[in-house]
Image: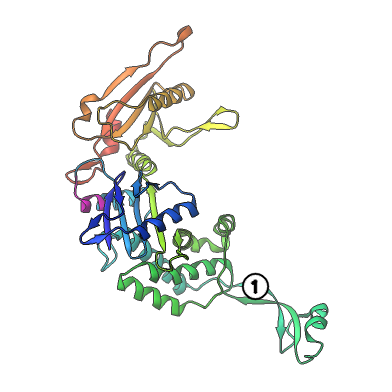
Amino acid sequence: MQISVFEHQVIRIGMEWSGQVFTARQYRALVRYQSHLNHHWYQILSDGIRFRHYVGVLQVGNLTIEVLPKTENAAPEIWRKVLLDMLHIAGVLKVETAGPTGLGIRPNFLLDYYFDHFLEKLNSLLYGGLVRKYRSLNQNETAWKGQLDFQKQIQHNVVHQERFFVRRNHFDYVHPANQILYEALRILPRLTDNLILRNKAHRLEKAFPVLPAWSFSEKEFRNILNDKTFTKYRSALELAYLIIKNFQPDIRTGRHHVLAILFDMNQLFEIFIYQQLVKLKRPEIAVFRQIQRPFWLNRKIRPDIFIKTKKAQFILDTKWKVLSEGKPSIEDLKQIFVYNQYFAADKGILIYPGVGKTKEFESSTPYHPLPNGAKPGYCEIRFVDVLKNNKLNLNIGKEILNL
C-alpha cells in the first residue's frame, strides 16, 4: 500500500487511496514512533497526521507514505525527480545514474535508492576485504591458549580439569563497525518489497561473517566514524545507521514496524541555493554558508549565506515557505535585520520559492531610521523559481547573483 502526500497535507483514519485505507492501527504506530524518537516530523491530530516541512518517506508495516515537497502545481512524479535532484546536488544522496536498474522512480523510490546505495557500498567492502581486529576473550576452552585466569579457573573448573579458563587476544571480524553493517543488512529485507533489493541483500548476508548483535549509542557511533581504521567504511556506516536508528519494530502489535527517512526542506533549500552559488566560481565573489558571530552569552547567530564582494556585503536567508500575499512574517524581518547589523551587511535578502504572481511583491526597502543615526540597512524580498519547465531550476544561482 502506497500513499503520496505533499508537505503540510493531512491524512485521517479511514481515508482511502486507490482502494486502501489508512487504519487506526497504522495511526497508533506512528503516534508511538514519534513518542519513542521524540521527533517533530509530523503533527499528531486526534484522528490523523498532519505533515510538516519534512519530505521523504515513512514506512508503517506494509504502508509506505511518500511526503513530497511542493511550492508549485506539478504532478507527484515531477516532484519525485526534483527531490532526487536536490538531494543529489546537496550531497545528501550520492547517485551516479538516473536510478538503480529495476528500481525506477516509483512512490517509495527514496527507500529503494538508499537501500541500493547501502548494498553497493557493502558489496565493495566485501570485495575489498572487511577489517579484522584483535579483541580480548575471557572464556573456558579445551586447550590452554593465552594466559590462564587462575581465579576464574578455580571458580569454574575445579571439577573440570580438562578445561582452561584463559585470557587471550583473538583476531577476527567481531568489532562494532562490522556489527553495525551486519545488523542493517539483516533488517533491510523486511523493509522493501523490491525483489531485486531483497535478493541482493540475501546474497550479501550469506557472504558476510555471522556476527553477534550490538546495541550502540550515537556517541559510540561517532567514535567509530572518527576512527581512521574505518575511513573506507564511512559511507556504508552512515547508511547503516540511518536504517537501524530510524527503524522501530512495533512490539505491541508485532506487525507495524516503522521506518522514516525524512529531510528538512528548509535545510535542503538552503544547501541547494548555496551549492548553486558556489558552482559559478566567480573570483570576485566569495560565498560562505553558516558562518557565525557571538550574539548573547554563549549563543551565536548564523545567517544561511554570506556573500562578500569588493564593493559590498550581502546576507541571504532562505525560507522554504509560500507567501500567499507576498509579505514576510515579522519574525523573518527581525531576523534579517539582526543579521544585517552583526555582519555589517549592505543588504539582507530574504529568498522564498516563487508561486503564481508572488514576484509582483518583490521589493528592496530600507528599515525605518534608527535612533542616534545608526545605519538601519536594507531588506530585500526575492522569489525564485524552483521549477523551470517542470524540472529543477539549475540556473537559480546565476539568477540570484544577477540581482
Q: Is residue 380 above or below residue 186?
A: above
Whether the magenta-drawn stretch holds residue 76 is answered as yes
Give the magenta part as a residue range: 74-80
Q: Residue at x 49, y 49 (%)?
A: 38
**In the depicted view, which residue is nearer to us: 260 or 266?**
260
231 lies left or right of 328:
right
Identify the residue at the far bottom of this view. Answer: 162
In this rendering, does residue 94 appear at all? no
In the rendered image, which quarter is residue 53 located in?
top left
Give coordinates of residue 157: x percent, y percent: 78, 86
In the rendered image, which quarter is residue 347 located in?
top left
* Helix, strand or loop at mark 1: strand
In this rendering, does residue 378 appear at all? yes
- What colour scheme was applied to this rendering of the protein? rainbow
Q: Residue at x 48, y 7 (%)?
A: 372
- Quadrant in which the C terminus is drawn: top left
> Crowdedness of circle 1 by 10 Å Cα count: few (<14), some, many (20+)?
few
Q: Residue at x 35, y 58 (%)?
A: 24
Whether the magenta-drawn stretch holds residue 291 is answered as no
